[in-house]
Amino acid sequence: ALAVALLGQRLGRTGLWTDESIYAQTAREMARSGDWITPTLCHRPYLIKPPLYYWLAGTAYALVGENELGARLPQAIFGLAAVLVMGWMAGDLFAKRMGWLAGAALLTSPGFFIGARVAGMDVLLLFCIAMTLVSFFQGYRSFSRRRPWFLLSGLFAGVGALAKGPLGFFIPAVVVLIFLLVRGELRILLSRAALEACLVALLTASVWYAPL
């Protein structure tokens, strides 16, 4: 409830900032043209960023209109989701009280709080990275459920690449690599579940990169 109040309060009441207007306009052109593969700005190809935000903002425009709220709604929703994921993970690892504290710590971090209230890609990327790592760690902890958790991790790594390019792969890959290296368990990377997760990540990202 606190996250909804903080992230949703007056979300569409202020004008768009410089970068926000670029992303919002690109999403509007994509939604109006019906071409969900090639982002354009002023009707010229604009391929600096992948399309996940544009897809989500275009959908939000259809629901709430082509306005500031529609442009910012995707980041706010996924910011809320990130708070819930962090709270759940910390509560699962430690205690319910730690879950509340972890969620509150993320929510009140200035960079995250501001980022979740503007049109853009950073909080989408943060959520995807968080889900990639949380899913990996859950699979690491539970051998009997490792494959589904690893596949979910690969899915979100691919979605992260659709959010902001190779960073969606690279950041969680480095974290996982260092974690397994420190624990002396690099062999997990060659397991069938891990290799299938990599394939899922590539297939997910190819939804946009292949036709482009």
Image (cartoon, helix red, strand yellow):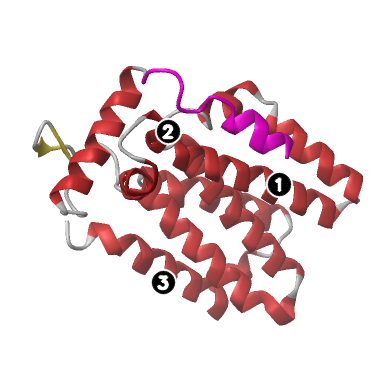
Q: Which of the marked residues, 3 or 2, is nearer the chain's N terminus?
A: 2
Locate the N terminus by quadrant: top right
Q: Of the residues shown, which amino acid type is indicated by label 2?
A: Leu
> Residue 26's spot in the image, x, y percent?
23, 36
Magenta region includes residue 66: no
Query: In the image, is 113 to the left or to the right of 182?
Result: left
> Residue 85's spot in the image, x, y percent?
68, 51
Q: Which residues are magenta?
A: 1-16
Mark 3 or mark 1: which is in front? Answer: 1
Locate the C terminus by quadrant: bottom left
Q: CA distance from mark 3 to mark 1?
A: 26 Å
Please name whichever residue, 205 or 20, is drawn nearer the observer in this view of the structure: 20
Q: Residue at x 68, y 65 (%)?
A: 185
Q: CA distance from mark 3 to mark 2?
A: 36 Å
Q: Which residue is mark 2?
A: 69
Q: Which residue is mark 1?
A: 86
> Residue 129's spot in the image, x, y percent?
54, 48
Query: Is disc 2 placed on a helix, strand or loop?
Result: helix
Q: Residue at x 54, y 73 (%)?
A: 190
| Mark number, residue 199 | 3
Q: Which of the marked residues, 1 or 2, is nearer the chain's N terminus?
A: 2
Can you name the residue that lies furthest to the left here? 44
Q: Of the residues shown, which amino acid type is indicated by label 1?
A: Met
